Image (cartoon, grey):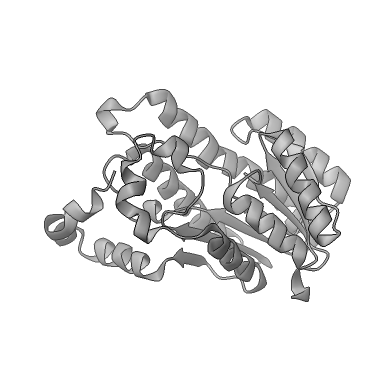
Amino acid sequence: MDKLKGKHIVITGASSGIGEKVALMAAERGARPILVARSIDKLQIISEEISRKTGGSPLFFQLDVGDIDQVQQVFSQIKQEVGHIDILVNNAGFGVFDSFHEADFADIEKMFQVNVLGLMACTKEVLPVMIAQHSGHIINIASQAGKLATPKSSGYSATKHAVLGFSNSLRLELAKSNIRVSAVNPGPIETNFFSIADKSGNYVKNVNRFMLKSDYVAERIIQLMLNPKRELNLPGWMNMGSTIYNLIPGLAERFVGGFFDKK
């Protein structure tokens, strides 16, 4: 419990969902969360709630991680204010589910801007600090969609494949340092993610019995901070499906391909 005490933890996408839950749970363990998201009003409310419940003093900054210039400006402020950053949780991201031929290319471009380039930009801002202090932990929230693509998520799956590729490469670059890089690959979670991704409601209806609770995912991310490892896959059985698919993709697509079409 004390391993997070006094740690500065930057969390992007902290205005709702698992970002909000991780911020509160980290503060309960004595960490100082630094909340980052587009909605300054929501961040203020969450910050006040964390202070009331934990007695801590979280910081919050308005930021659209898809705006690279803004990322540089805001992280410069964060570094000036707190000095050191111990953990970065790259949680900001969104998805839009469409058949590729019907998809709005602007949506795909924006997903890459936020899910991939924004994540990389935030990481690039904290790495010099972590290298200088000889410690740090970067946690990238990817997805099972980055390991097993499914119909009507071509753009979103492509961004999460990119996040995993980036995470794996960066981990190897930092192998001789004391900086850890972890990827979190959850299946569907009960958050407002699907209010944008699944406007029809079909996907949520079809996978409702498989959906993870946000509290559970957040607690597992806190445990990942305490005991870092290269990947956290949730739930385990879904990751087993991804592993089997990668071993025998042709057979998997032939015999159970229809099971993947839930959108």
**The N terminus appears in which quarter of the rendering?**
bottom right
Q: Residue at x 69, y 68 (%)?
A: 178
Residue 218: give x, y in percent of width and height: 59, 61
In this view of the protein, which residue sits in the foreground, 232 or 210? 210
Side of 248 relative to 34 (left or right):
left
Residue 202: give x, y in percent of width and height: 31, 42
Corner quadrant of residue 221: bottom right
Residue 232: give x, y in percent of width and height: 50, 66
Identify whether 222 is placed above or below 19: below
Q: Residue at x 46, y 38 (%)?
A: 195
Q: Residue at x 31, y 66 (%)?
A: 243
Q: Residue at x 25, y 28 (%)?
A: 101
Side of 41 relative to 168 (left or right):
right
Please say whether residue 98 is visible from this viewpoint.
yes
In this view of the protein, which residue sits in the foreground, 71 or 128? 71
Side of 224 relative to 3 (left or right):
left
Identify whether 154 is placed above or below 211: above
Residue 10: give x, y in percent of width and height: 71, 51
**The C terminus appears in which quarter of the rendering?**
top left
Side of 135 relative to 79 (left or right):
left
